[in-house]
């Protein structure tokens, strides 16, 4: 390229330069004439020395323009330029692939035509922040409408180039992040499911740990339960053998009767314990069945209470029965109802001091029978009330308890009540007493007449035997 400082320009040429005005067109002919006047070269000399350089520069500029155009048009993102009023002045062809609109269709329209109404305010805030600060980039998340009417999750970056003469607008670089959002949602869902699963596993593990602890305590209790009656039986037998060996049986009738009663009671205790263990095994295996028949529930409960009044008196306790109805027929298993009542009364006797009171009440409310067994005993601590109906659970610790028991009686009560489609609950104040409330729906078997309670007809000896078994872990001094 020639160096203009090396060219001698005479006064005439200076006059020619001063007479040249800014061209209003850019054709080759106009420039030729201008250059001729300025440089004083002929047309051939101008084309020979300067046109190749001009043409080369134009070609380089054209190549760079095509290069950057190709980058923009083939970008995976939508490149848009909007003015201060958010009207689109340029839009790359990738808008067709992502949003379904042609770039020509979008140019000249407000960008808010494509923004979800709920996201419009957030988008305006992002654009305003970008306008207020030069050369800043604002990130904006919004939903944009596809040509088919669906909404896509779009991530946009706004770059303020309003003062850039070549751009004179805000460059918006937008990409579809719908799949990314969906993947995040799926990951969040999986994480929630995983956390829930972990929580469930932890809860199961906690339950298993607690159950294992209860089972350990149960086996400790059961060992004690078996050992105590067996020691008593063995001791009584040893005394009988000793008296027999010394031939002093004659005249020792009172002692023999007392020892035989002790042996019998502890045999009943072992029998009760074995029966309870068998029953909870049947319940857990769903083999326990109820023999439902239409019975007078008032008669069953009253006869059960009457049969143990003498037992409670021997302990210095008052046992009272009251009912708001004279009779009420419902479908139930009389033996199991009797067992429920005996178990609850036995429980009250064990935890009520002499001089206390045990009250059994029966009433009806709407379509249910309510049976309550209340006492004025020591009550049950709050922390124990939650587990009192669980298997192997006991209100007293093995080392501190004051009464015998395996910890499965109330679990059996709950299970037997539920077999009648009922429920059992507890209300207790520590050191003030407890109330067990049984609720049984008044269902009646259709087409079956009322039957008498078979427990009270010609079966007194059997019933007494059952009472002795149920009360075998309570020692009575005066019961014959």
Image: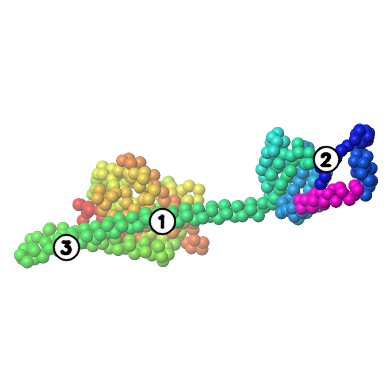
Q: Which mark is residue 205?
A: 1
Task: Give the vertical position of 247 relative to 41 (above or below).
Answer: below
- From the top left corner, tell me how far across and down residue 124 is, in percent: 72, 38
Front position in the image: 72 or 398: 72
Residue tagged 2:
6
- Quadrant where the C terminus lies? bottom left
Q: Secondary structure at mark 1?
A: helix
Residue tagged 3:
234
Whether residues under marks 2 and 3 lie with C-beta atoms below 8 angstroms apart, the answer is: no
Q: Is residue 383 left or right of residue 267?
A: right
Q: CA distance from mark 1 to mark 3?
A: 43 Å
Residue at position x 61%, y 55% from top? 183
- From the top left corner, tell me how far across and down residue 242 is, in percent: 8, 63
The answer to whether residue 340 shows anywhere in this view is no
Q: CA distance from mark 2 to mark 1?
A: 96 Å
Q: Secondary structure at mark 2?
A: helix
């Amino acid at each position: 390229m020639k160096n203009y400082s090396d060219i001698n320009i005479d006064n005439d040429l200076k006059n020619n330069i001063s007479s040249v005005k800014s061209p209003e067109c850019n054709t080759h002919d106009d420039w030729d004439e201008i250059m001729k006047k300025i440089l004083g070269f002929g047309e051939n000399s101008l084309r020979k020395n300067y046109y190749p350089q001009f043409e080369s520069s134009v070609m380089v500029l054209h190549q760079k323009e095509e290069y950057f155009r190709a980058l923009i048009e083939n970008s995976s993102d939508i490149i848009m330029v909007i003015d201060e009023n958010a009207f689109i002045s340029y839009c790359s062809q990738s808008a067709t692939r992502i949003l379904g609109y042609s770039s020509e269709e979008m140019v000249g329209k407000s960008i808010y035509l494509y923004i979800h109404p709920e996201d419009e305010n957030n988008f305006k805030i992002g654009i305003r922040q970008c306008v207020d600060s030069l050369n800043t980039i604002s990130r904006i998340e919004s939903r944009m409408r596809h040509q088919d009417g669906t909404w896509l999750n779009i991530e946009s970056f706004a770059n303020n180039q309003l003062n850039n003469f070549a751009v004179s607008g805000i460059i918006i670089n937008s990409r579809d992040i719908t799949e990314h959002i969906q993947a995040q949602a799926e990951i969040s869902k999986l994480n929630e499911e995983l956390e829930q699963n972990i929580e469930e596993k932890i809860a199961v593990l906690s339950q298993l740990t607690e159950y294992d602890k209860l089972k350990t305590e149960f086996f400790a209790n059961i060992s004690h339960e078996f050992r105590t009656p067996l020691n008593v039986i063995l001791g009584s037998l040893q005394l009988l053998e000793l008296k027999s060996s010394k031939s002093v049986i004659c005249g020792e009738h009172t002692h023999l009767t007392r020892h035989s009663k002790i042996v019998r009671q502890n045999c009943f205790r072992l029998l009760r314990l074995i029966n309870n263990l068998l029953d909870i095994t049947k319940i857990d295996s769903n083999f326990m069945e109820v023999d439902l028949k239409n019975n007078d529930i008032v008669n069953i409960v009253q006869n059960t209470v009457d049969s143990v009044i003498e037992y409670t008196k021997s302990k210095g306790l008052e046992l009272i029965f009251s009912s708001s109805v004279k009779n009420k027929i419902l479908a139930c298993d009389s033996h199991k109802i009797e067992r429920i009542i005996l178990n609850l009364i036995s429980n009250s006797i064990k935890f009520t001091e002499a001089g206390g009171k045990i009250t059994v009440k029966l009433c009806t409310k709407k379509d249910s029978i309510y049976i309550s067994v209340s006492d004025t005993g020591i009550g049950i601590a709050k922390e124990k009330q939650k587990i009192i109906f669980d298997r192997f659970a006991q209100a007293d610790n093995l080392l501190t308890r004051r009464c015998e028991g395996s910890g499965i009686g109330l679990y059996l009560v709950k299970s037997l009540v539920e077999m009648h489609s009922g429920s059992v609950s507890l209300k207790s104040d520590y050191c003030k007493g407890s109330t067990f409330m049984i609720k049984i729906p008044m269902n009646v078997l259709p087409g079956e007449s009322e039957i008498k309670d078979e427990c009270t007809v010609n079966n007194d000896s059997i019933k007494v035997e059952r009472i002795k078994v149920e009360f075998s872990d309570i020692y009575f001094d005066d019961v014959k």
